[in-house]
Amino acid sequence: MTKILIVEDNEMNSDMLSRRLVRQGFLVCVAADGPTGIAMAGSECPDLILMDVALGAMDGWETTTAIRSSPRTRHIPVIALTAHALSSDRAKSVSVGCADFDTKPVDMPRLLGKITRCLAELTPVPADGISDATH
């Protein structure tokens, strides 16, 4: 089962997103701040991380940079989530290593498409079309 780590400091947002992802068949874990997100990225070994950009003392970009700096977690795709649809936010997200960027409020079909694309890029399918990857 695919595991997604949500790093989100707003409990209502993380609860809503978590419930919607569970209904889609994902296993979900939640971190309420950057340092907890970094620790859980290492301990939970998620397949993908949804990262709120505005986390407080340690923002989502700093958290992503820390996740990218560890050999144990650098391969995990991160999708940045923010209420601000500024091109500078998108550029900053890409510069710190996010695989994609999306805006809040979350448009679930669009986000699911981005999650699917990031996971597909992470798990290459062999030429015979049969993947032996397990999640």
Image (cartoon, rainbow, N blue to C red):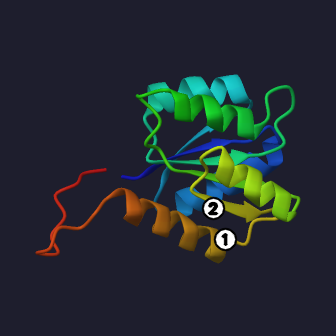
Q: Is residue 60 above or below residue 21?
A: above
**Which residue: 54% across, 35% down?**
68
**Which residue: 84% across, 58% down?**
88
Residue 8 position, x and y percent, is 74, 41
**Which residue: 32% across, 59% down?**
123
- Number of dots carrying numbers: 2
Q: Earlier in the sequence, mark 2 or mark 1?
A: 2
What distance separates the C-alpha of mark 2 from that of mark 1? 8 Å
Residue 15 visible somewhere in the drawing: no
Q: Is residue 103 above or below residue 94?
A: below
Residue 73 position, x and y percent, is 46, 33
> Is 94 left or right of 124, judged from the image as shown?
right
Asked whether 57 or 20 is in front, the reply is: 57
Q: Residues within 10 Å of mark 1 (few under 14, many from 20)?
A: few
Residue 89 visible somewhere in the drawing: yes
> Is 71 left or right of 28, judged from the image as shown?
left
Mark 2: amino acid: Arg
Q: Are marks 2 and 1 in contact (CB under 8 Å)?
A: yes
**Residue matched to label 2:** 20
Q: Is residue 78 above or below residue 56?
A: below
Asked whether 26 or 128 is in front, the reply is: 128
Residue 130 position, x and y percent, is 15, 70
Q: Residues within 10 Å of mark 2 (few under 14, many from 20)?
A: some
